[in-house]
Image (tube, helix red, strand yellow):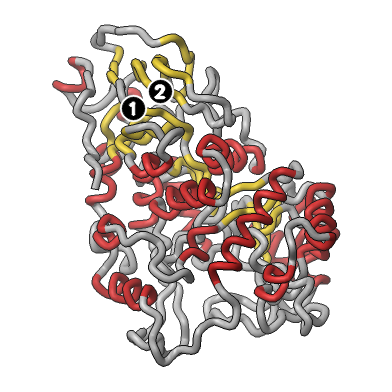
Amino acid sequence: MRSRRLPFLVLSFVLLFRPFGSAQQAGTLAPLVQNYVRVNAPKVILARVRVIDGTGRAPQQDQNIVIERGKITSVEAGSDVSPTNSVTVLDLRGYTVMPGIVGMHNHLFYIARPNFKADWSWEEPLLVPQMTFSAPRLYLAAGVTTMRTTGSVETYADLNLKRKIDEGKLPGPHIDVTGPYLEGANSFAIQMHELSGPDEARQMVNYWADRGVTSFKAYMNITRAELKAAIEEAHKRGIKVTGHLCSVTYKEAAELGIDDLEHGFFVNTQLDPDKKPDVCSASEGDYTIEHMDPNGPEARDLIQTLVNHHVAVTSTLPVFETSLPGRPPLQQRVLDVMTAEAREAYLYFRNRPTVKEPPKVDPEALFKRDMQLERAFAAAGGLLVAGPDPTGNGATVPGFGDQRGIELLVEAGFSPLEAIKIATLNGATYMGKQDQIGSIAAGKNADLVVVKGDPATHIADVENVEIVFKDGIGYDSKNLIDSVKGRYGQY
């Protein structure tokens, strides 16, 4: 593993010899949160740093970023600055600062299969335990400063977690809490409610919007009528709706007014031969993606429909990479944060049992096809955003999965700078927060990630996170990760 320490930090006298930050700033953070704070002062200067600003333009070499009261006040030519009692200076030669990641398909739960064994057998029901302790710390440690839950199971817990983070009582990113899944009949998850029709879809949207959720997600078995009702009601409240669909095709959803579609182009079912209205097909979209030539008329028509209707698409490549033999790369840092049981399940998933039949469709071919369709969508002017769908399923772990998603976008053919923009500014744009977060510029929130190396030339350097600034307060990545080692999968 690469070094996770910052050997060249020059910290002010204030930072070295008294508790972090001024009384005014520190007073807003509970002692528990302060345990993970590394930099907290009225004014912080990130000196002599390489800046990847999130817009896709070339990095700016040797820059000083000035942070005051949680905001970026200037980005200027690099210079040597002496610290004072009120100014903290970090000498960051050899480091890169990029915007905080905006995770657009993230979760606060883990998928558990009771009595899961090496032959992939397990006993019903599949369960979804909440990771309210470990997940927020892992997200923040990896550089995710804003995230959408993209489907909640314990929505009250997620809302209360968001409130406590915003109040400075718990560490974690800014959270866009998505309401409970808007799911139809025959859900595979025992913890999901099944809608009885359009009226109940409207009721659910209004009930949870009244309680503070800021987005909704439609799920695999929702009907067109239920989806239409949910979208209309959410839009009345100024709230967007995304979807992991199957019973409804991408074109149908776009025409109904959906705002976002999850999982790239993997779960579009419009070409599946057994597709019936309002019913999920047997292949759940595998047939469609296999037969949808990115340069063919069906793909061109679909992509143009999505662009015309301003429908974003969320790339979730990490969760699909796990279906490929020997992938993702086995990383000790991922194993270290898991419980023994979660680690065992992860290793079982990596080894396809001999008793299992090979998949009917080559997963490598589907993976490459989705990459091609995502590139075509972006090239046509579509808004591509990113998130890893991190539920522990196949090693998609919070935070680490977000970093892996950026790496896989580069594998898909995007430049490193384009991939970073997809994972930062594009997400902020979808959320309507592009003036506050998602890129580095004077006046924006100081949501920043300090990494060792240069992701513009070596994208894997996005893993080398040292400090994560959220609202101008710098959190220690290593300490956050150490606090959850051996716990992900438990709580």
Residue 224 image label: none
**Residue type pointed to by label 2:** Arg
Q: Is residue 410 left or right of residue 113?
A: right
What is the total number of numbered labels drawn onto the structure image?
A: 2
Relative to 56, is 43 above or below?
Answer: above
Looking at the picture, tell me which residue is in the foreground, 393 or 67.
Answer: 393
Relative to 203, is 56 above or below?
Answer: above
Q: Residue at x 68, y 73 (%)?
A: 285
Looking at the picture, tell me which residue is in the foreground, 22 or 231.
Answer: 231
Task: Point out residue 134 in the picture as x, y percentages from the top left corner.
Answer: 34, 57
Q: Is residue 6 left or right of residue 102?
A: left
Q: Is residue 476 visible?
A: yes
Q: Residue at x 28, y 38 (%)?
A: 476
Q: Residues within 10 Å of mark 2 (few under 14, many from 20)?
A: many
Task: Point out residue 184 in the picture as x, y percentages from the top left corner.
Answer: 69, 77
Task: Point out residue 312 in the picture as x, y percentages from the top left corner.
Answer: 70, 50
Q: Quadrant of residue 425?
A: top right
**Residue type pointed to by label 1:** Tyr
Give me the C-alpha separation between circle 1 and circle 2. 6 Å
Looking at the picture, tell me which residue is in the foreground, 90 or 464.
Answer: 464
Residue denoted by label 1: 95
Q: Is residue 204 left or right of residue 18?
A: right
Looking at the picture, tell me which residue is in the foreground, 462 or 325.
Answer: 325
Q: Residues within 10 Å of mark 1 (few under 14, many from 20)?
A: many
Q: Residue at x 48, y 41 (%)?
A: 101
Q: Quadrant of residue 20?
A: top left
Residue denoted by label 2: 50
User: Badges 1 and 2: C-beta atoms under 8 Å apart?
Assistant: yes
Q: Is residue 130 visible?
A: no
